[in-house]
Amino acid sequence: MRWYRWLALVPAIGMLGGVPFVNRVEPWVFGLPLLLAWVLVWVLLTSATMWLIYALDRRHERRAEQSGA
Amino acid sequence: MNPALLVIGAVLALALALGVRARRGRTMTLEEWTVGGRGFGTVFVFLLMAGEIYTTFTFLGGSGWAYGKGAPAFYILCYGALAYALSYFLLPVIWRYAREHQLLSQADYFTSKFGSPGLGVLVSVVSVIAIVPYLVLQLKGLGIIVSEASYGAITSNSAVWISSAVLVVYVVVSGVRGSAWTAVVKDVMILVVAIALGLYLPLHYYGGMRTMFERIEAAKPGFLTLPATGMSPSWFISTVILTSLGFYMWPHTFGAVYTARHENVFRRNAVVMPLYQLVLLFVFLAGFAAIQQVPGLTGSAADLSLLRVSRQTFGPWIVGTIGAAGLLTALVPGSMLLMTAATLVAKNVYGRLAPGTPEVRVTLLAKWLVPVIALVSVYFTMRGGETLVTLLLMGYNFVTQLFPPLLFSLGRKPYATRAGAFAGILSGVATVAWLTLSGVTMATLVPSWPDVVKDLNAGIIAMLVNTVVLLVVSLATGPRGATDAAVTSRPV
């Protein structure tokens, strides 16, 4: 079972779930209002999460190939 | 002719030349024309997909909404990233099935999976209906660019006519390969132009981003956050969910999936593409910078803000370069949309209704339909007064209705039955049509309910109706109606 694939839900929940709580201008982050900065950070984290899942998938597939061969 | 129009004309000539060059040495079968012979690698598919996603909507619509509405525009940044995360799991499944069954279009998928040519026709019709507002959006964008770059010498209406003629020629000449090569030029230009504008304008006019945002906040308190009612967090979240689920339901995006050589292409794209969304930050910054420099653009005129502020800031050569980048952001996706709509009508509607039509005739019909669909779009472009973002959201409401049947069709033995898929799509589309035509929103439907419910995007409601109907009808008709792939290869 590739449990780690559920990690893909983290960016969705983080990005959207946080919106009601960070719907503010302050504190400023790198000169950006908080809400915009929040969304941006989660876009970056989405890419990072998918990279992690891809890396784990690759490892999983290599192992499956080895044990199959 | 002013220098701005000269630059735009030169880029247009280049795009056409690339299109003509790309088709040389290949016989144009329908498969070659539409899915490039299914032999594109990571880079090409990446560019094709980016080519569809960075449309004039991103460029003019994104800055227009930042200018006119403020924080609600941030939704555009969110939905793309989440859609790519979803694509990691969704696209390889579709791709494998499509290759096994030699599919060319989105409608083929539904026809084959449910063993129902009728469902393929229904899906095609829904897709074409959804494409029209999307095409109107591209034509409107082109019209804005050409007339702004001419400094008013060309009226917006004649600009729309010129643009649609260009689009038609481009599509007929080049097909999908032309799109991919022009996408290369377009991506480089849009990256450079968006980042340059987004960094330069706040610095030039305000001395920095923080100062710019502080001044906007002082002049319009609450502009940089979501309002408590209307485009509230509830609207924001439901809109992001709706649009990220609908993202790959667009027939041209779905079709681009088939061009890949290997399924790993999608998995790598899912890692890289969210980063590509960051371009939007700079587009927003340019839109925000325009607020106090070119004030007074209201309603759909907000879409002019990016080019107005550019005209005020730079000379005609630079305005021309910005306009040319904008032209490509409309031309590449516009050509994909036109080609997809034409292929859908020719192959998946006409071809099904008149079976036995030779492929040469279908291909010819597809090419003749290109100018016809362009004319329909011109008609709607001349009529409406919607902003670019509103148009896209309208298309999304329709196209997302294809997500529930797709989702419940993915397994080897699909949960959804033929009747379930039919009933689901029809009820979803009917709900959208009713909501759109009557202007009903959640707020008018249930006025006494809390704002959290009232602000929900109406498209979500339609999708829920669709899902419930699909599940109930599938339960009532299954498993008798459940078809396996084997049934579907029989001739129709």
Image: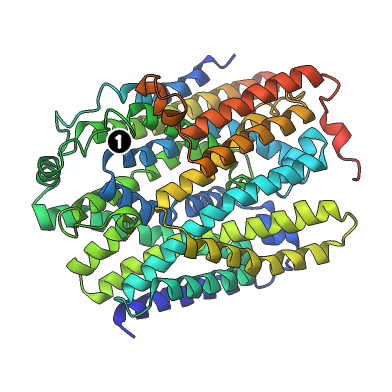
Question: Of B427 and B307, which appears nearest the observer?
Answer: B427
Residue at the disc numbered 1: A40
Colour setting: rainbow
Corner quadrant of residue B310 = bottom left
Question: Of B241 and B94, which appears nearest the observer?
Answer: B241
**Local secondary structure at mark 1:** helix
Left or right, A5 with respect to B402, comes to left
Q: Position of residue B196 (x, y in %)?
A: 25, 58
Quarter of the image for the N terminus of chain B: give it. bottom left
Single out the residue that lies furthest toward the bottom.
B1
Q: Position of residue B370 (x, y in %)?
A: 65, 66
Res. B185 in view = no
Task: Name the residue located 27 percent from the left edge and 33 percent from the top edge.
Answer: B226
Q: Position of residue B258 (x, y in %)?
A: 66, 47
Left or right, A37 with respect to B442, comes to left
Corner quadrant of residue A60 = top right
Label 1 is found on which chain of the structure? Answer: A
CA neighbours of label 1 inside 10 A, class few (<14), some (14 to 19), many (20+):
many
Q: Position of residue B485 (x, y in %)?
A: 82, 32
- Up the image or down, B405 lies above or below B19; here it is above
- Up the image or down, B220 lies above or below B190; here it is above
Left or right, B2 with respect to B345, comes to left
Res. B217 in view = yes
Task: Name the residue located 46 percent from the left edge and 22 percent from the top edge.
Answer: A9
